[in-house]
Image (cartoon, rainbow, N blue to C red):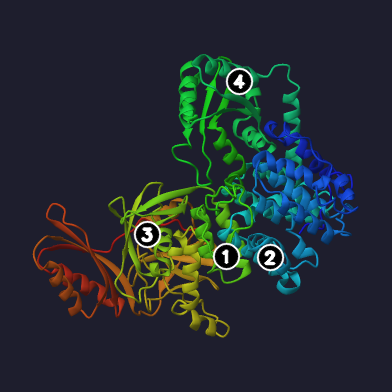
Amino acid sequence: MSAEATNPATPGPATPATQRSASLEPEATPAYRRKARPRIDLRRLGRAALLGPATRDRLPDAIGHVAEAHRAHHPDAKLEPLRRAWVLAESSHRGQMRKSGEPYITHPLAVTLILAELGAETTTLTASLLHDTVEDTEVTLDQVREEFGDEVCYLVDGVTKLEKVDYGAAAEPETFRKMLVATGNDVRVMSIKLADRLHNMRTLGVMRPEKQARIAKVTRDVLIPLAERLGVQALKTELEDLVFAILHPEEYVRTRELIAENAGRADDPLAEIAEEVRAVLRDAGIQAEVLIRPRHFVSVHRVSRKRGPMRGADFGRLLVLVNEDADCYGVLGELHTCLTPVVSEFKDFIAVPKFNLYQSLHTAVTRGDGQVAEVLIRTHQMHKVAEAGVIALGNPYAPPSEEAPDGGGDRPFDGERADPTRPGWLSRLLDWQQGAPDPDTFWSTLREDLAQDREITVFRADGGSLGLPEGASCVDAAYAQYGEDAHACIGARVNGRLATLSTVLRDGDTVQLLMGQDPASEPSREWLEHAHTPAARIAIQRWMATHPAPGDEEASKTSAADPRPPVAAPDRPAETQAARPASAVVDRPGASVRMAGCCTPVPPDEVTGFAVRGGVVTVHRVECAGAARMKSAGRPEVEVRWGDTAECRVTLVAESFGRPHLLADLTEAIAAEGVAIVSATVEPPSQQRVRHTYTLQLPDAAHLPGLMRAMRNVPGVYDVSRPQHPATADR
């Protein structure tokens, strides 16, 4: 898994990038981690390991440092599994070297030490020592299972790469797919992977620059978002800095110079504010520990870009640690009373924790010279979880037991358990990945999904809730709730009001999805423009792949022989889909045509077109507000004309006064014109007026004027019109 990395004690060629990477960690490591035990010389320990394991009555020196860190978090932990895992790992990797020339055993040892420092339990550390044995040595999973049990075997298998010989270019995405599926059953799989990638990133200097960049990009796009979502901030921040140094070396150097310049200041405003805070809390009788947390490199870079010139207090934040939840609010009250608060900076992540388990109060205080200090207030336990995330949970699958307080690996394991701590984003990821048709789609969709780093919660009409990424629409909610049955969705109510399926949902909204009764209902192709989640997009794309739009197949057969511009099917409104649409023709070879959903033009409407992305021309009615906006935006118009008239689908709105049997009379009038009703919606009466919305299938567009006249002739109906939906953004 890391045979190509180099050891930090022997960096690769002295290139500027290598020097920056090698020097990054000591400068960027926050104070709370620097004051722990000194860094261990893994090179020396690795060479000592070549002499063979120590006697059975004591741990070898190398693994002894891991045991020391482990016992700091788990005083009663059983260390025998670690000793046996060390013996197997050291003997199986003996003779293997990293590209730097160091013994390979230094890598699993370093990964295990990272996890031990974060408080991982014994089972995780045992699997971490063995995580490369199955991949890089003759050890088999059966041997691991026989020696250490099913649980350790599961973790080792979860982080073992798939072979390029078997999967070719798909090996990396399929490895991540396998790893994520395993994480869904046991989050400790990803904990080991994150620590593994951190050590590899620390020791990346021996690689060629192009390979460093490739690994850094995957780390940025996949591993860092996963660390954030699992709450492992200690790993996430260091990974960010290491990626920053490789992908943005010039900006990294400037940021390092900013930090060095601030460190040389004679005064330290943050230390002065920290002392004021200590005095305030001491006078209030609140026991608290006030620490200064230096910002890591990427954080300094972001703040400098956001605020401009940096001031002394911008280079760090104050961390106030207390014993009880109530003390957090006591501290907040004292600070806001005795110091000047910046009200806009207050956030309460204790009452409403983040989706990654994070809890803390955020505020900021200012002093007379304008220096502003950000303050984080949390309990010691909250701090542990904030730094280590899911790792701080120990073994989340172990039943309460006095015999196994450390979550040892001797309990039965059924292999089918569900993670009680699995967050909603992980469940959604596991659901949509099953529908990803190929590795490329999975890989690109995974990166897009992980880029959406804020989650909202919306409530269903039945009292349940849905977790969705920020920016999700009613389309996304439909597929999150109903899966592929959402193809039959015809509309929604958001907070009790009718809304289009394109409506973007906000945190706390209540959404009621309206489902059609026709089992053969089909999604609109326009829904793809509003689908924000991978689950929705993949389901719609899969349906589109098996249901090509009318005319698509014929166009593909004749395009080579027929030089005329192709004729494409129009898009329908969000709640409908046409069968054989009327055709529109544009004088632009190779362009496809799409009917705008905001005005649903049909013959003989006067129409105009606008070129959008992908070589598509959208067709609007001339009087459409969407067309007016595109003109005002400077979009050039494209001449459009109607081709041969054919079947079309249209939406009509009938405004009427309320009376008995009105719906039956309207339905009869429509049927008498030989028109099929696809769907109908009747809004609740308002001031004795009723609004009916019909989606109708006409045998020919020429029938439309006569149909509208027949509907107007129904007693009580005072108007029939073509609706104009809010225009979607053409791109």
As shown in the figure, which amino acid type bears the numbered disc 4? Ala
Name the front one of labels 2 and 4: 2
Judged from the image, the secondary structure of the residue bearing numbered disc 1 is loop
- Taking 667 as reference, is 313 above or below it? above
Q: Quadrant of residue 187?
A: bottom right
As shown in the figure, which amino acid type bears the numbered disc 1? Gly
**At which x and y percent is residue 156?**
69, 61
Label 2 near label 3: C-beta < 8 Å? no
First-in-chain label (1 vs 3): 1
Label 3 near label 1: C-beta < 8 Å? no
**At which x and y percent is residue 520?**
35, 77
First-in-chain label (4 vs 1): 4
Q: Is residue 571 left or right of residue 199?
A: left
Q: Which mark is residue 274?
A: 4
Name the front one of labels 4 and 1: 1
Q: Residues within 10 Å of mark 2 (few under 14, many from 20)?
A: some
Q: Is residue 129 left or right of residue 399?
A: right
Distance Cα–Cα, label 1 vs label 3: 40 Å
In the picture of the structure, the residue carrying the numbered disc 3 is 501
Label 3 near label 4: C-beta < 8 Å? no
